[in-house]
Amino acid sequence: MYYIAMVDAEKCSQHKCNICTLYCPEANTLMFDKAKNTSWVDVDRCKGCALCVYVCSDLLNRGCISMVMAQAKEA
Ligand code: SF4
Ligand code: SF4
């Protein structure tokens, strides 16, 4: 089990802001899909720091990202 960020695409796509992606400390982890107007998380790369949650919820008051427990993939 590990802790990862998950974007609510339906909520996020209403804002079209792309701001959280600027703050993720991991490369190619929190990205923006221009076609769908939503950010998304590469679950295998997310380190669970929750910085993106702070940006979307506390700074922007949008609440589109939450931290969830995920099962590790079978090797
Ligand atoms: S900051 Fe929030 S609303 Fe903006 S792109 Fe990220 S998840 Fe979506
Ligand atoms: S929890 Fe941290 S590593 Fe994961 S997507 Fe958010 S900012 Fe990036």
Image (tube, rainbow, N blue to C red):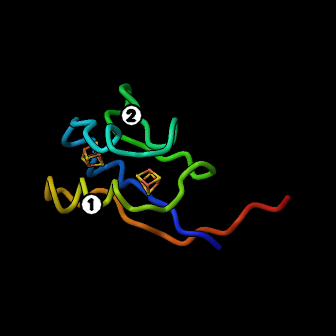
- Under tag 2, what secondary structure? strand
User: Disc 2 marks which amino acid?
Assistant: Phe
Q: Is residue 34 left or right of residue 58?
A: right
Residue for point 53% across, 57% down: 47
Report which residue position mark 1 lands on. Answer: 54
Say if mark 1 contacts mark 2, CB within 8 Å: no
Counting other residues with Cα less than 10 Å from the Cα at mark 1, is it few (<14), some (14-19), or many (20 or more)?
some
Which label was assigned to residue 32? 2
Dividing the picture into quadrants, the one containing residue 32 is top left
> Where residue 1 appears, x then y in whole percent?
65, 73
Which label was assigned to residue 43? none
Q: Nearer the viewer, residue 16 or 20?
A: 20
User: Disc 1 marks which amino acid?
Assistant: Tyr
Q: Is mark 2 within 8 Å of ligand 1?
A: yes
> Where residue 5 appears, x then y in whole percent?
45, 59
Q: Residue furthest top?
A: 35
Q: Please tell me how many numbered marks the rendered image carries.
A: 2
> Where residue 24 appears, x then y in whole percent?
39, 45
